[in-house]
Amino acid sequence: TQAPVNVTVTGAAGQIGYALLFRIASGQLLGQDVPVKLRLLEIPQAVKAAEGTAMELDDGAFPLLSGIDIFDDPKQAFEGTNIALLVGARPRSKGMERGDLLEANGGIFKPQGEAINAGAADDIKVLVVGNPANTNALIAKSHAPDVPADRFTAMTRLDHNRALAQLSKKLGVPVTELKKLAIWGNHSATQYPSVQHAEVGGKAVEVDQAWLESDFIPTVAKRGAAIIEARGLSSAASAASAAIDHVYTWVNGTPAGDWTSAGVVSDGSYGVAEGIISSFPVTAKNGKYEIVQGLEIDDFSRARIDASVAELVEERDTVQKLGLI
Ligand code: NAX
């Protein structure tokens, strides 16, 4: 039988952690034949709560869960890890400016990047969920010079799944009929969910532009706020589900004739500033995410992509000035 895969989850005692850990333990992250060993990272004040979650994980008697270790030190938490899910982050508090938020998160993602660089396994794959996810991933990557840059990704799969759900409702077809949707840019309100290349039942999707602009795009981009409004808490189980999807696809590949969306390091494709972590349509093959090449970009898409990328460039410039990258 296979040796267990080490999976580190940060923010393990949080809402997303609570939903995510049970999905991982049940084998949905890597597959029903892959044992996993969990390494949970929390801040000291939340270690006790993480221990409570670990007790519940024990009580699940999951056949594929071969152990749980809890840490408050990133150096230990990332030792020998194969998959790192960086969920814990510093939320925006009242009156906090964007620069303050980026700085506070730099204090988390810089040491985590360093710890990954120092101790993670050679095949390490990193998914950043904690917001601002794209720029947090950029900070972590910048402090892990010995890890190939393409191992650092940011989550826009939840946005992708939200877009699938909205389009499926609009067209009255199951999500399985839809292909080639894409999220471009930042995981923020500026993101661009694109149906330009989308297909339904193998044919081009046709929807009117007014619906796209006044309904589809804002509904997807502001879904997080709508969930908070309805639930009184931010998206958790759907975010955990998207994180599972992101890693499962990364390891197992995308089906032929389709793609998905992920925040990956830009190689300058489609005029997206090289080096930033932006969402693109991506395929996965042999354990690598690759940006889909050769797509024609219409004027509407161009303007939307540029606007979201401009925000990412601004975030990068801010963290550069703060000495965080
Ligand atoms: P919670 O506040 O419930 O949990 C966060 C946990 O992280 C807490 O237990 C906290 O103690 C821990 N933490 C803080 N700093 C840490 C550190 N340095 N090391 C380890 N753990 C640390 O938040 P939750 O609802 O679970 O959301 C987590 C993050 O996901 C937030 O940043 C949130 O904004 C982000 N999201 C990202 C999404 C995406 O699509 N990329 C969607 C969902 C979610 O909003």
Image (tube, rainbow, N blue to C red):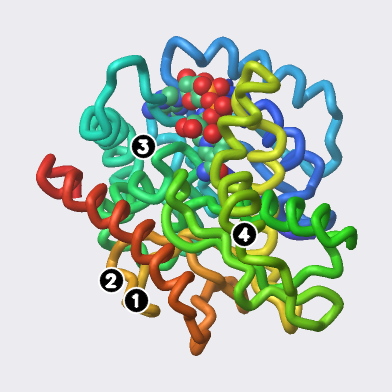
State if disc 1 and disc 2 touch (CB < 8 Å). yes
Q: Residue at x 78, y 57 (%)?
A: 31
Q: Residue at x 29, y 38 (%)?
A: 111
Q: Disc 3 or 1, which lies upstream in sequence?
A: 3
> Which mark's residue is nearer the viewer, 2 or 3?
2
Element under disc 3: helix
> Which mark's residue is nearer the viewer, 3 or 1?
1
Residue 274, numbered circle: 2
Q: If the image is split into quadrants, where does the N terminus sit?
A: bottom right
Q: Nearer the viewer, residue 149 or 293?
A: 293
Horizontal side, residue 235 vs residue 202: left or right = left
Element under disc 2: loop
Percent position (x, y) of residue 116? 37, 48
Marks 1 and 4, how far apart at CA: 33 Å
> Which mark's residue is nearer the viewer, 4 or 3?
4
Q: Nearer the viewer, residue 5 or 228?
A: 228
- The kind of residue on which mark 2 rests is Glu
Q: Disc 2 or 4, which lies upstream in sequence?
A: 4
- The kind of residue on which mark 3 rests is Lys
Q: Disc 4 or 3, which lies upstream in sequence?
A: 3
Q: For mark 4, what is the residue?
A: 210
Element under disc 4: helix
Residue 267, numbered circle: 1
Marks 2 and 3, how far apart at CA: 30 Å
Residue 75, numbered circle: 3
